[in-house]
Image: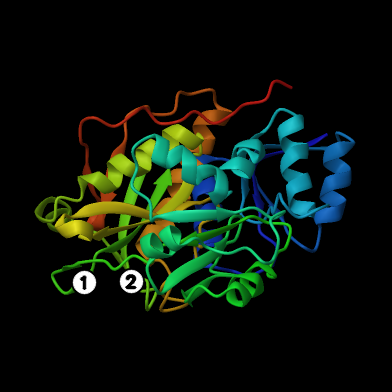
Amino acid sequence: MKEYDFGLNWSVKTREVFINALKDACQELGLSFFWVSNYNVKEVIKKLESNELKIKVLLDTEATYNRERDLYARVCYAVKDAGGVVINDPDRARLAVDKSVTHYELINRGINTPYSVVVRNWEPKSFKLTDEEKERLGVPFVIKPACGYSRLGVVEEAKGSIREIAAARNFDPGDNFLIQERISPIELARKRAWFRVFHVFDKIVPCWWDDRTSWYEHVTKDEFENYRLASLAKIVSKIAEITRMVWFSSEIAIDNKSGKSRFVVIDYVNDQCDMTAQSYDKTGVPDSVVECMAFFIVKAACKLIRDQEINKDYTIWLNNGVDVQIRGLPETPEPLIQAS
């Protein structure tokens, strides 16, 4: 049997900053690296399922669990069934990325979300909002698929007609949909108070993220303290506690609905974080964040392989490598290890 320490589900053979950083981290920490792509995925599945190949830790960026016979989902389950660790565990990810599930879990735990109406896939295309729902949603509002990603299938400026809602649902008739209040963030130092916050094992990495331009900036220590952004870490750590996910991002905005500032979670759990680097695309993640995210993941994988304990206490990682710790955060979730 051929064994690899660290595997990566990444469909295309491109030399991106994130992949190079993962490979460099593996080399630095003495781990072997294996790349699963469109070129070899079918052969990899055969070898995993026949015990000719074993991957100890797999980082998944490709699996679509609600797509029938998805090859990368099958790789994830083959690794898990053989006793390997998958980041993120496929059974946890299946539930966590479904906004129609996670929405209720968050609000039941006291986390602010936009007012939402969940439309089930079996409801007729003649679905109609009540007058009360229309009033609470406001106009315009947002329509999004429950298991969607990368804004696919999202309608940003919905007005509320039956035809409009039916057309949006045609994106994926088998999926549930959320009809959601549109959030208008406040401004902090001429920046929209909209953030994308990354969770990676024992690290929380907050970034400004402009929802109109997709521009990222890594939050500085002064910004974190002056604008009292500790709630970003508290919310994301609580989402991790609820979902048991170890690597994901959440979109969080600050608005002043009803005349009072509040942190509100827009995009609950994005389990396959887009790691396109800013040096490659202006809407990408800052290169320093991409590179360190890769190192954090491989370092955690190394601990898992060597049966070392993952840190239980969170560190908030800010711009220029500044680490901050705050009280009151839950313990970091443990990766799910399947007995082989």
Q: How many marks?
A: 2
The answer to which of 191 and 321 lies nearer the viewer is 191
Residue 336 lies, in percent from the top left, at 59, 29
**Residue beneath disc 1:** 191
Residue 107 lies, in percent from the top left, at 40, 41
Residue 46 lies in what quarter of the image?
Answer: top right
- State which tag comes first along the sequence, 1 or 2: 1
* Disc 1/disc 2 C-alpha distance (Å): 8 Å
**Residue beneath disc 2:** 210
Residue 23 lies, in percent from the top left, at 56, 54
Residue 234 lies, in percent from the top left, at 29, 40
Identity, as a three-letter code, of the amino acid under mark 1: Lys
Identity, as a three-letter code, of the amino acid under mark 2: Asp
Q: Residues within 10 Å of mark 2 (few under 14, many from 20)?
A: some
Q: Is residue 86 left or right of residue 256?
A: right
Q: Are marks 1 and 2 in contact (CB under 8 Å)?
A: yes
